[in-house]
Amino acid sequence: MNLERYPYSVSNDFQDYSFYSDGPKGKIKKTVLYIKIREKPIIYNIAFGDVDPETGEINDDIISNNSDMDIVLATVANTIHDFSDRYGNHYIFATGSNRVRTRLYQINISRLLDEISIDFEVYGVIGDQQYKFQRNVNYDGFLVKRK
């Protein structure tokens, strides 16, 4: 995808990405983690949030309101490309920390579905079932897999 995004740093194992959101609230450190949650088929969970400057812990409940949501989401999406380049076509599972966030992710997937679908298979998850992603269907989470 050819969207504006932030530069990020990546760990040696390509499972931990960090970048800074830059907006009216200043520079806010963000982290994206890939954690294997299943072996057969292999599924990685993508965890994403602000880094607490005091503890270094990721908080996925914070609403930063730094006026750069599209750039932040494009940066996170780019890490999926980077991760997939290193780890192949395994499933990556994403869901929001709450229903509002999940809906926000769904809106953005719907908006960019044609572009995303060039490189990835996209599925919506309802309960423990996965379905080919369709616009205007509410999902509990999402799976993507490199084609």
Image (tube, rainbow, N blue to C red):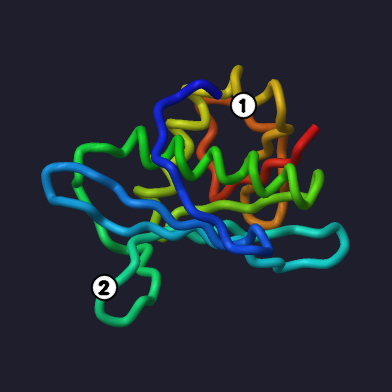
Image: 108 above or below 125? above
x 49%, y 45%: residue: 76
Q: Label 2, secondary structure: give it.
A: loop
Q: Residues within 10 Å of mark 1 (few under 14, many from 20)?
A: some
- How far across and down, in percent of the image, does residue 118 sit? 70, 21
Q: Is residue 32 left or right of residue 70?
A: right
- How far across and down, in percent of the image, does residue 89 sit? 81, 44
Amino acid on which disc 2 is placed: Pro
Amino acid on which disc 1 is placed: Ile
Image: 9 above or below 12? above
Q: Quadrant of the N terminus?
A: top right
- How far across and down, in percent of the image, does residue 52 sit? 29, 72
Which is more foreground, mark 2 or mark 1? 2
Q: Is residue 143 left or right of residue 79?
A: right
- How far across and down, in percent of the image, does residue 83 sit? 67, 49
x 52%, y 31%: residue: 109
| Residue at which label 1 appears | 116
* Residue closest to the eye, 26 or 130: 26
**First in sequence: mark 2 vs mark 1:** 2
Q: Quadrant of residue 29?
A: bottom left
Circles 2, 1 touching at the beta carbon (< 8 Å): no
* Residue closest to the eye, 25 or 103: 25
| Residue at which label 2 appears | 53
